[in-house]
Image (tube, rainbow, N blue to C red):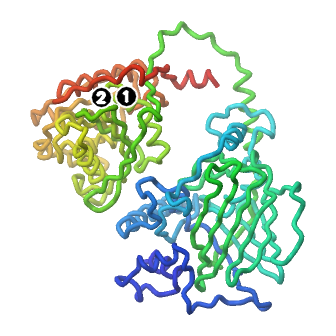
Amino acid sequence: MKRLSAVVGMAVGMTVDMVVGAGLWLVLLLFYTGAHAAADYTPPLTPWGEPDLRGTWPLSHLIGVPVVRPPQFGERFLLTEAELREREASVASRDARFQSGAIPQADAAGVVLAQTSLIYDPPDGQFPALTEYGRQMQDWMKGSYHPTQTVFDDINDFSAWDRCITRGMPVSMLARNYNNGVRIFQTPGYVVIMLEMAHETRVIPTTNVPRLDPAIKQWLGESRGHWEGATLVVETTNVGHGLVIGLSSAGNPGSPGPLQPFSDDMIITERFTRTAEDTLAFEMTVSDPKVLARGSYTYKFPLYLDNSYAIYEYACHEGNTTVRNYIETSRFERAQPRAEAPPQEPPVLRPVIAEAAIPLQTLTPVATDGVRGEAYLRKPPGAGPFPAVILVHGGAPRWSTDMLREYALHTHASRFLAQGYVVVVMTRRDLDLELPFNEEQPAVKDAVAVIDYVKSLAYVDPASVVLRGTSVGGYLTLEMAVVREVAASVVEEPFSFPFLGMRGGNVQGQAPNLSKLERLHSPLLIIEGDQTPSINEFNTAVLLPALLQAKKEVTLARYPGELHSFAFFDNAARTLHPAASLHAFEAIAAFFRAHFAVQPVPLDPAWVRYVPVVTPEANQEAN
């Protein structure tokens, strides 16, 4: 129970046995609401009489906590016990993955925190929106982490982080996936914070040392400290190069994005309070009204003493070939003659429906095990009743908020909305290989919670709810259609082995279990491309005969030349031929209409504009 002793220790210095079963979450709340230290705890003092903060306080334990709060938690700063158990399993899996092998690939988080985010204020844990000035700064920023930048000609096309100069402030006080050491030294009149990442050192006077002229800017700014009782308060000003540093938070889990600007007027206020022998309570407020629409935001989290943590030389610049490689590659690509474009057919168009006109609604349905899910919903104007489609992605679990929003606003989600559907895009937990592949799976519980919620909506016709899933999402769609009545289901190259009770690496020699198919009452359409044989040959080729043997209503649509999940996206690398993706969508829509009790009514054309679908090749040409 390392996480219990860790979080309790940071709160009041008590042992696990003293609090488990008798108010653990009250104890946690005391810490997170500002009651940092127990009345009977007195921090040690240095020989010259100041609170003693000396030691090594690594940031690795923050790896398991997102910077920005996932929306399903709302304004809740602490996980429930069930959610904490889920995070423990996720962090343990992540640590085992990255710590395996002769050389670990990343730091281990180790301790698991109960926070839903590192951002404490604003109350919803979100990174503040940018002002117009902040957005202009963001547009000017450059660097290898820029999602669309392709031209690299000289050193000014790179960020300070690309060039091994600095991560800057405030992100230097946040975790990354490696080199998370923070060591604090003290002498009379000074506190020194040494950062392992980028081998930087912050020298902080705690006496009345005159400040630098405001015109003098430094990479980490100028810090001045003072003591308020047992708390060290550090104010940092004169932070320069806001376009070059740009809060490059790539690598921080759940960060607001790699390029976030700051102005020369940014002020950072940090508070360090020793709350137990091995714990510091840390708060950091970033104030920058020029850039941040709400003016400021605050981080809050504990630091743990670990003097066994070894800090080695950080030799970034010495082996940095990134800058030269980017420049040489960029120049080479732009110097190549462009092939004459072949005659083009009329572009395939996709609908765009402004979020301001039909906003995204955030859903947080609660599964039967008490875990809140995450989904987005868009509905046509009016009271309904409308048909509804639930879209279940494949690939990795727990899509980020940005990815989920992007899919909900674009791709096939917008096509369904334009035709008059209520559209729900959901994400889910990972599959648990230790559990049976049925409704006991956490991911299936997430999906079922979404179905039940959607069917309960007054503007949805419960007899006209349909499912659409791809890959692992296709497996979940099959499970959903077994445990809940739906009008119709579409699966694209579903991960069908577990659904059919087939486990292990040698599934070709196993017979599928047909008993579950007896409970599958939903008509089924299977979509697949033929260019990912490792998937379709060993999934659809097993599922389809089993369905036919069970005398189920099933249709197969195969698209030559298309990749796995090609029909789930309009604007992604898998969609090599937008016309095929559009044809697949039209086939899916026709299949759904044939089984609806209530037919969809297309949106008024005034709500919808159409833009060309851009292929990967066209994207490269445009760049």
Q: Which amino acid does label 1 sit on?
A: Ala
Is residue 446 visible from the viewing direction of this image?
yes
Q: Is residue 538 in view?
A: no
Looking at the image, residue 491 lies above or below residue 296: above
Total labels: the figure holds 2
Image vertical order of residue 177 relative to residue 307, above or below: above
Mark 2, residue position: 527
Q: Mark 1 points at which residue?
A: 567
Viewport quadrant of the N terminus: bottom left
Left or right: residue 253 compared with residue 486: right
Disc 1 to disc 2: CB gap under 8 Å:
yes
Tell me which residue sits at (39%, 43%) in the image. Answer: 361
Residue 569, relative to residue 183: is it above or below? above
**Considering the image in quadrants, where does the C terminus appear?**
top right
**Residue 524 placed where, x, y %?**
20, 32
Residue at 36% across / 48% down in the picture?
A: 363
Q: Residue 402 carries which label?
A: none
Which residue is the extreme one toward the top?
A: 343
Left or right of residue 323, residue 44 in this image: left
> Image check: 573 left or right of 522?
right
Label 1 or label 2, whichever comes before in sequence order: 2
Q: Where is residue 350 in the image (x, y as percent from the top left)?
A: 44, 22
Res. 266 image quadrant: bottom right
Q: What residue type is labelled 2?
A: Ile
Residue 562 in the image: state x and y as whole percent: 40, 25
Residue at 49%, 57% in the rendered image: 124
Depth check, front residue: 36 or 426: 36
Query: What x and y, as percent, mark residue 165?
Result: 78, 53
